[in-house]
Amino acid sequence: MPASLDVALNPASVAIIGASDNPHKVGGRPLLYLQRYGYRGAIYPINPGRASVQGVRALARIEDTPQPPDLAIIAIAGSEAVGAVESCAARGVKVAVVMTSGFAETGGEGARAQARMAAAARNAGMRLIGPNCQGLANFATGMVANFSTIFHELAGRDGPVAIVSQSGAASQAIYALLREKGVSARHVHATGNEADVTVADLAAAVVRDPGVRLVLLYMEAIKDPALLAAAALEAHARGVPIVALKAGRTASGQRAASSHTGALATEDRVVDAFFERYGLWRAADPQELVRAAELYLGAHRPRGRRLAFVSNSGASCVMAADHAERRGIPLASLSPPAKARLKTALPAFASLDNPIDVTGALLSDSALLGAVLPILGDDAQTDLLLVALPVAGAGYDVPRFARDTAHFQQTYGIASAVASPQPAVRQAFADAGIATFAREGDALDALAQLAGHAALLRRAAPPPPGRVGVPGRTRFLSEAESLALLAQAGLPVIEHRLCRDERELDRALEALGVDIVLKACSPDLPHKSDHGLVAIGPADPRAEFRRQRERCVVLGARFDGVIAARRARGGRELALGARLDPQFGPLVLIGDGGIYLEALKDYRLLLAPCAEDEVLAKLAELRIAPLLGALRGQPPRDVHALARMAVKLGDALIAWAGTVASVDLNPVMVFETGAAALDALVERRQDD
Amino acid sequence: MPASLDVALNPASVAIIGASDNPHKVGGRPLLYLQRYGYRGAIYPINPGRASVQGVRALARIEDTPQPPDLAIIAIAGSEAVGAVESCAARGVKVAVVMTSGFAETGGEGARAQARMAAAARNAGMRLIGPNCQGLANFATGMVANFSTIFHELAGRDGPVAIVSQSGAASQAIYALLREKGVSARHVHATGNEADVTVADLAAAVVRDPGVRLVLLYMEAIKDPALLAAAALEAHARGVPIVALKAGRTASGQRAASSHTGALATEDRVVDAFFERYGLWRAADPQELVRAAELYLGAHRPRGRRLAFVSNSGASCVMAADHAERRGIPLASLSPPAKARLKTALPAFASLDNPIDVTGALLSDSALLGAVLPILGDDAQTDLLLVALPVAGAGYDVPRFARDTAHFQQTYGIASAVASPQPAVRQAFADAGIATFAREGDALDALAQLAGHAALLRRAAPPPPGRVGVPGRTRFLSEAESLALLAQAGLPVIEHRLCRDERELDRALEALGVDIVLKACSPDLPHKSDHGLVAIGPADPRAEFRRQRERCVVLGARFDGVIAARRARGGRELALGARLDPQFGPLVLIGDGGIYLEALKDYRLLLAPCAEDEVLAKLAELRIAPLLGALRGQPPRDVHALARMAVKLGDALIAWAGTVASVDLNPVMVFETGAAALDALVERRQDD
């Protein structure tokens, strides 16, 4: 059990190895910041060549400090940093922050030096942040052990947000964007190469700070999902939302990430599944990461997603409806009584639909917004409100609009925001406690995010991630063995017989009838159709049996027999799968079936164990989802049966306890009632 | 032929009916602005109650002006505005700008008043802008016949951009966003209810202004596509790009639009097809509309889309790769010699891939960017450059980076941009003539837009839109008649026979063999499969013939016989369609076939006539496009044959000259070689 990182955020004393008198060098900045931001603990600049550094008495060696410092910053160049870590470890330092670069990010030799550094720390029970990191900053205590330029240009100020980032540059960008929104951060930490401490470690630490009400993460790799899940569970328990940017999202992004940090490429949709399970909201870029900050810091957690949009511009209303439709944001409906009230409140010609155009009449009638909003509140069909004021200059009573909106938010507990291109308009609303946006689209997206994230966090706390060892060498089972294993686990499979000879085939034909499919069964041929070894409704089953047997011989494959399976008709082919991920554990896949799965990639992943309603939600996200409902000349498909199969498959994978590496069920036929696997391929531990 | 609108942009004299002494009322603002912005023509405030208005001598009536004014602003309330238009028409005014509201946007009575107003103008040959419009603004001449608040808050300044918007509020928002980017507009026009003059009319007028180098449009309806196409062709000839926001894009957006402006809902993808044909770039929101303005105003028109990304932050590189992949922006490759040169220019450990991470070394080595860029230029594999500097504060030689980037852009003619969150960094690059962005994602999207739009505009000028009258009442042809008509037009259809009795069926079976499909043929049953009237490979064709005949009798449908068609195997089912759109003329549809077409809406539209390469480009945009290539166990499909069919179908629709309203070919089977319609449904003029 590594030592807690709480001391890293609140050390009683800080040493700076390689402290510089130049406040704008890497070794000088931390000293500048510790003093500027009022750090009250002991500060020990370590510099054998000087009696004082930036006016603070310097010591020659780390050994000269009166007590072992809680935290040591290491800012000396290159190879000397390894020795410094060793000295700190020997001295009993609790946390070392290594800013020095030139380690794993430079390749082989650097990686070996980094490994030595990490081992020295680990052996002494010292936590190591970095190397190649910008460091830590805690503006509650002034403990700014960080060399980032941004705290020079944009003075830090204590606030309710924590930023934890692998990349220093990203931490600066996020910090700057947040400040642009008028929100301050208490914590800004960058972990660099993560030889020991990862973003997940520090996320867990900042979540425990009662002053933190929103956590923003930037990662290029998730090195320890269990640790991140633990931090997320803690945050969930404390009601602190986490928004996370996992970069290296796409194939080429992952290439850049692996050359940048040496991180392993992970299948990106696993990250989606992992985040969703643990209630982390995933942001695509730094803007999206900070987008909803003001709304999160407000008191209101929407119970639903229905959005009301009120504007004094018809064009805004049209564009808002477009945007909502593109993003799948449901617009709140209005009940007939609410429409009747609106009719009396609005000018005669105004439309009585949401988006609500209060028209240019707002200029002459400053009470109009205050008259409209309670109608929405009383109607109780609205979960989110956006007031858009693209036109509001001289003559508009903006402070009144702000008061009316704040009163609405307060009275009805409905999260509300305003969008205006004019800073003065935004300021009036911000002063009244309303979240503000320059762009209407950003405001709509942020409100939808608040609602979506609230829904994630309303769910019961999920279990910690499954820990199932992944087998080393594996082999494929034959189709008959695979189907048998799955049937044993309680999954419905198509009715079939394995026929080792023509006599058995005759008996199968008696049992199944002639409307059958014949498929050669061999553990050596996982992809039968590639070899012409699948015959649908063969005219002469016995001749087909012989043909397939001969074909196996020609291919040099073992021949276990031919599977005669009842021909499945009148369903939709989907795919189910399961695999043990070395990082994320047991996973379940649902997707479009057949060759479509690989060609169109219309699939979703879930962490196992999963529940039926989770699977149904993922099914509904598939592009082919509309094909599962009632269509012309086609009844709806039994998606519940499919979802039950997915749940069982995930449970089975866990129950198999590392003996099964992966399962492909493709296709699974989903009927009007029921569903069944038509084909199966199980990848099993070699020695089972 | 209505009078030209050039006089609307450059009138020699302006009258203001309803001129107000209060410069912040609708009737006061135009007078304020005309004076403030230095309009040099004659100004005639018309106000029977005052001798002067805002210090300008007033006249009692429009009849009192020494000559008929070129332009008259009408700002008097309600019903009086109709009389004012009539007076202007009688006086010989060339253009009336009616700011007064309360017309078509308020419903029936207002619409009738508006119609009277429009008729009065039309009869006199006077052009009418509005009613319910914010008016015109030309900052080259100071002719600001506009009441928008924004020109008070954010002073107008002549520039190379023209904004034409249906909505006044949208015109203000676009203007403000453009100014935020440091770009100025010469023209800002808002057309309101468009009783006569539409956005397309004014677009055509501003395109003819040699000082205009970029046109931005906002529309909620395209009332006259031919006029807009004419403006686009003129812009194409002059090399002036047009970016257009057509709002009311989605179903609910269209509802809001129709209640807002009374505009007809149009099928949104027709607008996509129309814009693409005429080289208009479609923006989704106001931010996207102005996004690439600086790049358009630069001299460089990329010949391709390959983007190079250079940053001093690895995290930026990872996120840029993510963003490029999400948006389908191709990253430029580097040749081996270029990589070799990079290796000597960059720190030893830097990766030699694009995105190019010049690393933190840029701080100590200010020449680094200038060393890297010529390598990209000499390699000639880059069409677009983005330099991202998320980290650049004290100690960075930003002016040098800006000079090096400008030198690169100039030397190699490669459109270049910079992204930085810091205004000072952006300013240094802007001063050097480089387009600047606060957000890297916006910059990437803007560069991709510049390249995409340049490709659209490089194509030969398209023909003006087809004008084919749409038939009134229509009827469906039977399948046999439909297939015959299409075969006549040269489209491949599946081999088939219409069998009116069992003798003819026997002969068909002799000709086609037994592997057939039988389908009842009746003009009363366009959807045969809904009635169980399609049999694939029937065991007893004669019994099936009788069954289908009886079923038709039971359904009370005419029975033309049964179609025996060769059964098509081994292809992919797609859909083709064609229809005459009342607004946009002849259209061709390509999409995924079967019930998928309606359920998944995976289709694209093209304006007819269309060329084979256009169809292929649209085919490649379908979600199912990967299924048309070579897949496991499946050869690639003959997409060229399908494209030729689409071209022929469009040509046929035009040749049919309004006698055919629509054609559905669903499915069209696309084979390894060739393609053929398996089913057809033609909707024909009733009386043909």
Image (cartoon, coloured by chain):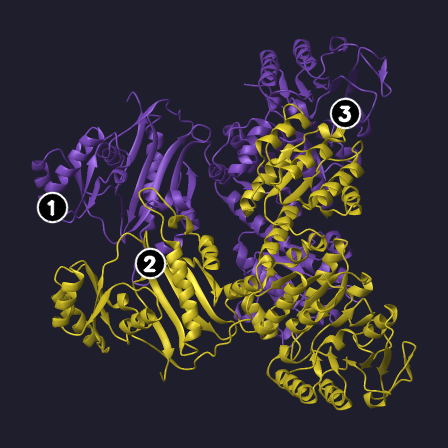
Chain colours: A yellow, B purple
Compare marks 1 and 3 and give the one earlier in the sequence. Answer: 3
Question: Label 3: chain?
Answer: B
Instruction: Determine which quarter of the picture holds residue B19.
Output: top right
Question: Which residue is tagged 1?
Answer: B540
The image shows residue A186, relative to residue B479, as above or below, that is below
Instruction: Determine which quarter of the picture holds residue A316.
Output: top right
Rendered location of residue A502, percent (x, y): 12, 71
For residue A380, side relative to residue B553 (left or right):
right
Q: Which amino acid does label 3 sit on?
A: Pro
For residue B27, side relative to residue B335 (left or right):
right
Q: What residue type is labelled 2?
A: Ala
Q: What element carries label 2?
A: strand
* Front tag of 1 and 2: 2
Whether residue B262 appears in this view of the structure is: yes
The image shows residue A311, relative to residue B568, as above or below, that is above
Residue A675 numbered mark, or none: 2
Asked whether A24 or B70 is in front, the reply is: A24
Question: Label 2: chain?
Answer: A
Q: Do labels 3 and 2 share a chain?
A: no
- Residue at image position (57%, 49%) is B449
Q: Which amino acid does label 1 sit on?
A: Asp
For residue A578, side relative to residue B320 (left or right):
left
- Dots 1, 3 in contact, CB < 8 A: no
- Residue at image position (65%, 74%) is A198
For residue A564, side relative to residue A584 (left or right):
left
Question: Which residue is tagged 3?
Answer: B30
* Front tag of 3 and 2: 2
Count all numbered tags in the image, as a single digit.
3
Instruction: Determine which quarter of the picture holds residue A337.
Output: top right
